[in-house]
Image: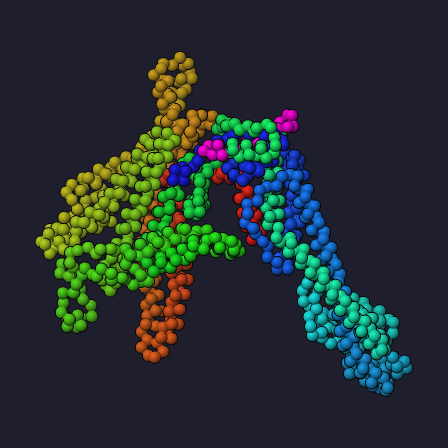
């Protein structure tokens, strides 16, 4: 709790490492993850640093591993993860790793090239086989028609119309030339039109589709092709036809003219296809064996290479001494972990075999250290919510410990339903129980990763929503009658049956006993339920908001005391707490006083001045208080009602408002005046070097107050702020606080508004959807109820839990960021980012998933 409430004390240390032991020492620090190194070579180009060649070698090894990973995933081979902790290898092991990766990459590339060449040959033979098979039909048709020249002419005429010069040539020669090939099926129409236009109809095209898809050796995709054969006359048309085929990426194959030659070629093609199949299967088996062997060690190789690369990248941040035998580094480390860092450096020195121990010296610095909180998997999610607003300034109070309780509580005030909270809790508990299996699956969905990272937040929000659901007595918009009602009906049965609405008088129908827990279930059937809940939830939201803001002002006192900001305590905290207490906390006390002093039961006992009809309006009372106006009885027609809740209220309220108003100039002028006075005394001291001891003591005490107000732990005045800037900043701070007290208090009314909206939406969903299924009395009522319940459940999950839950979550986040944290939280720090192998490997794995 201590390290979570206030960040760890940090120290800037200088580290001297022998060159031979630097690699091992940095490796041990990376495993420990408690040192943030600074770049001592900011002006040196990244390509001119000492270990740039080693970093390049690591990049090359990582490229080869990514190539192996791509090939492994292409074949669907699972990548094994042993789960063991892998230490960073020694520098001499880089040579063995490079040789292993080089051998694997070359072997795999050679296998892939051979396989691609074999697949290309197989594709060509397959296409040739289909050409010989499909074109046989075309040649059979041609041979049957070669007997008569008119039949050949008729063949051309059927396709493209009769050209006289074509018929004459065919009649004289009796023969046509031809080419055969394969083309993509979707290019056939355009291919046919281009042949017709370019050859002016003097060619004859026949095509047939190949039924089975063919595998493209380059891309590995399945494509559909068609066999074509083109008949033409003359060498000129032959050249033109080949150019068109080349333009449409059609592949031409030699096709014999005689049936005997085609048959012999077909037999030879089938034999070669069978041989190629055998060779391809052997090649694929060899490739598979290589990839399976690589998949077993791929995770280990990635971890080793990334650790080596991270070490050399960190070593590039170091400086070399004059002798070139020692590396000098500067790093931020937690003071509490200095002993652990010493042990890690000692282990690294022993591993390297060096005889010179490393030296770690603390340095004096005026720089602001980074902010570091020790987190676990429970507090990590809540800290992420605070860091999204701004990282805490070094050693200032952290809102996270308080947000662990206040965040789910404020959420539950807006989301108060036992049933909805129960569903949310079940979902969060499922994620918590199955945390390790779900974490190992590494989902790519960003929404799921957000839910999973905030599982403990969701669990607490659901649990608190169950609690407020009991207080509101709200369970899926229905009330639970656990303890029975404290109201009773004093009318006869016939009176109740005759009257549609019955008014229950609290003087006669109430037992004068409080309901044990939450709201009485009788309010579920009351016509004035909304009016009652309106007043109740509005007052509760104001009380919760004022207490929350007062707590934030109290935390600012802890900050001032810790940093010894005495002037801030006197000129900021005291007037702030007085202003808020005398106005807004007094408003909350009036609410409690009204609840306790006025009731309808008092009229039954003859206490008319304490009856419900004499209860004054809190809002009107507060407005009259601020405007210094007198209050009047709430009901002018009732003369015996007192306009005030207690004797002396008017004078006491004027006193409170007067003191609160006096706090405004106190906050506005107090701090600038004390700073001006302190600087004037310092100037007098500089002019009069022989100042008395009393003057020195006064200056020292006031300097301590002023230095603390600047937020620094030390007492340095190197960068004094201009006095005009101090006045402007203090004026802005005062105006922001005074106006913020009003606007922030009103902002907490969102607790009331969203709570009512959620309850009414849940009730509307029940009455308009679920009641339809419950009202069915026929034989198919069960089926209708089943369908209606499914629709109601989907709408409940989608709208009331997801959408309403997200809305309440965002409003709760705003209440913490704006209304609560602005009272004490600066959020102007920067995070502690240590050199840690765990963080580096997790970031690399998340990048791969993205």
Q: Is residue 416 left or right of residue 24?
A: left
- Find residue 716 and report its image quarter: top left
The residue at the point 40 percent across, 20 percent down is 682
Pick the residue in front: 88 or 126.
Answer: 88
- Find residue 575 and report its image quarter: top left
Pick the residue in front: 619 or 443.
Answer: 443
Q: How is the image coloured?
A: rainbow
Q: Position of residue 313 (x, y in %)?
A: 61, 39
Above-or-below relation of 206 to 834 = below
The residue at the point 14 percent across, 67 percent down is 491
Q: Is residue 324 left or right of residue 227?
A: left
Which residue is most to the left? Answer: 606
The residue at the point 55 percent across, 45 percent down is 85
Which residue is most to the right? Answer: 172
Q: Is residue 517 left or right of residue 407?
A: left
Q: Position of residue 53 (x, y in %)?
A: 67, 39
Pick the residue in front: 766 or 327.
Answer: 327
Above-or-below relation of 224 to 566 = below
Where is the N terminus found, in terms of image quarters? top left
Q: Is residue 390 magenta?
A: no
- Find residue 612 and report its image quarter: bottom left
Q: Position of residue 608 (x, y in %)?
A: 11, 52
The magenta span reads 321-340
Q: Is residue 333 magenta?
A: yes
How many numbered circles are shown?
0
The residue at the point 31 percent across, 41 percent down is 550
Which residue is most to the top? Answer: 690
Q: Position of residue 488 (x, y in %)?
A: 17, 63
Pick the residue in front: 478 or 206.
Answer: 478
Res. 404 in view: yes
Res. 41 in view: no
């Amino acid at each position: 709790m201590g390290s979570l409430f206030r960040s760890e004390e940090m120290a800037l240390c200088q580290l001297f490492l022998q060159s031979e032991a630097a690699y091992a020492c940095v490796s041990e620090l990376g495993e420990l993850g408690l040192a943030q190194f600074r770049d001592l070579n900011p002006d040196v180009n990244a390509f001119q640093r000492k270990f740039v060649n080693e970093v390049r070698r690591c990049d090359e090894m990582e490229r080869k591993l990514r190539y192996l990973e791509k090939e492994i995933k292409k074949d669907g081979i699972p990548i094994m993860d042993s789960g063991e902790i892998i230490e960073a290898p020694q520098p001499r092991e880089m040579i063995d790793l490079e040789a292993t990766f080089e051998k694997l990459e070359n072997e795999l590339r050679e296998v892939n090239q051979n396989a691609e060449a074999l697949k290309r040959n197989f594709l060509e033979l397959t296409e040739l086989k289909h050409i010989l098979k499909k074109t046989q039909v075309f040649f059979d048709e041609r041979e049957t028609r070669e007997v008569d020249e008119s039949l050949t002419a008729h063949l051309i005429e059927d396709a493209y119309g009769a050209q006289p010069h074509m018929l004459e040539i065919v009649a004289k020669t009796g023969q046509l030339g031809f080419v055969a090939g394969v083309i993509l099926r979707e290019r056939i129409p355009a291919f046919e039109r281009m042949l017709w236009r370019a050859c002016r109809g003097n060619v004859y095209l026949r095509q047939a589709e190949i039924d089975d898809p063919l595998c493209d050796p380059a891309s590995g995709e399945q494509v559909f092709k068609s066999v074509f054969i083109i008949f033409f006359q003359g060498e000129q048309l032959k050249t033109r036809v080949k150019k068109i085929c080349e333009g449409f990426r059609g592949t031409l194959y030699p096709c014999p003219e005689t049936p005997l030659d085609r048959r012999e070629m077909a037999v030879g093609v089938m034999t070669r296809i069978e041989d190629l199949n055998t060779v391809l299967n052997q090649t694929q088996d060899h490739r598979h064996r290589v990839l399976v062997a690589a998949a077993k060690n791929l995770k280990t190789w990635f971890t080793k290479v990334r650790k080596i690369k991270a070490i050399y990248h960190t070593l590039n941040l170091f400086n070399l001494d004059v002798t070139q035998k020692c590396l000098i580094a500067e790093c931020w480390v937690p003071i509490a972990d200095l002993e652990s860092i010493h042990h890690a450096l000692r282990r690294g020195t022993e591993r390297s075999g060096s005889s010179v121990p490393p030296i770690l010296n603390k340095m004096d610095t005026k720089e602001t250290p980074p902010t570091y909180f020790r987190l676990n998997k429970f507090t990590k999610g809540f800290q992420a919510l605070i860091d999204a607003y701004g990282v805490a300034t070094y050693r200032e109070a952290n809102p996270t410990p308080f947000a662990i309780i206040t965040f789910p509580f404020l959420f539950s005030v807006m989301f108060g339903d036992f049933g909805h909270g129960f569903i949310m809790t079940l979902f969060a508990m499922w994620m918590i129980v199955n945390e390790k299996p779900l974490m190992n699956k590494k989902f790519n969905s960003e929404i799921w990763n957000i839910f999973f990272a905030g599982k403990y937040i969701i669990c607490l929000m659901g649990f608190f929503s169950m609690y407020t659901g009991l207080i509101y007595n709200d369970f899926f918009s229905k009330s639970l009658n656990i303890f029975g009602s404290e109201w009773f009906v004093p009318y006869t049965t016939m009176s109740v049956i005759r009257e549609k609405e019955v008014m229950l008088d609290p003087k006669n129908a109430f037992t004068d006993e409080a309901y044990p827990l939450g709201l009485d279930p009788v309010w579920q059937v009351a016509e004035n339920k909304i009016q009652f809940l309106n007043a109740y939830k509005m007052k509760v939201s104001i009380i919760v908001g004022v207490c929350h803001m007062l707590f934030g002002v109290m935390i600012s006192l802890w900050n001032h005391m810790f940093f010894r900001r005495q002037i801030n305590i006197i000129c900021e905290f005291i007037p702030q707490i007085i202003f808020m207490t005398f106005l807004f906390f007094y408003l909350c006390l009036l609410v409690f006083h009204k609840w306790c002093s006025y009731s309808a039961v008092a009229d039954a006992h003859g206490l008319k001045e304490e009856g419900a009809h004499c209860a004054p309006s809190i809002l009107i009372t507060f407005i009259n208080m601020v405007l210094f106006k007198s209050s009047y009885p709430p009901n002018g027609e009732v003369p015996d009602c007192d306009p005030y809740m207690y004797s002396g209220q008017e004078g006491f309220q004027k006193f409170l408002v007067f003191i609160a108003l006096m706090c405004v100039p106190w906050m506005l002028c107090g701090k600038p005046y004390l700073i001006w006075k302190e600087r004037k005394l310092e100037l007098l001291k500089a002019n009069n070097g022989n100042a008395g001891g009393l003057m020195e003591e006064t200056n020292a005490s006031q300097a301590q107050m002023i230095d603390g107000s600047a937020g620094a732990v030390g007492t340095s005045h190197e960068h004094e702020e201009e006095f005009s800037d101090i006045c402007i900043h203090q004026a802005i701070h005062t105006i922001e606080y005074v106006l913020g007290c009003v606007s922030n208090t009103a902002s907490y009314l969102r607790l009331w508004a969203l709570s009512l909206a959620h309850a009414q939406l849940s009730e509307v969903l029940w009455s308009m959807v679920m009641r339809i299924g419950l009202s069915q009395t026929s034989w198919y009522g069960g089926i209708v109820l089943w369908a209606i319940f499914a629709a109601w459940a989907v709408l409940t999950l989608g709208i009331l839990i997801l959408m309403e839950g997200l809305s309440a979550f965002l409003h709760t986040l705003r209440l913490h960021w704006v209304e609560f944290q602005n009272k004490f939280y600066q959020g102007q720090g920067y995070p502690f980012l240590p050199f840690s192998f765990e963080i580096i490997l997790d970031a690399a794995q998340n990048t791969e998933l993205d």
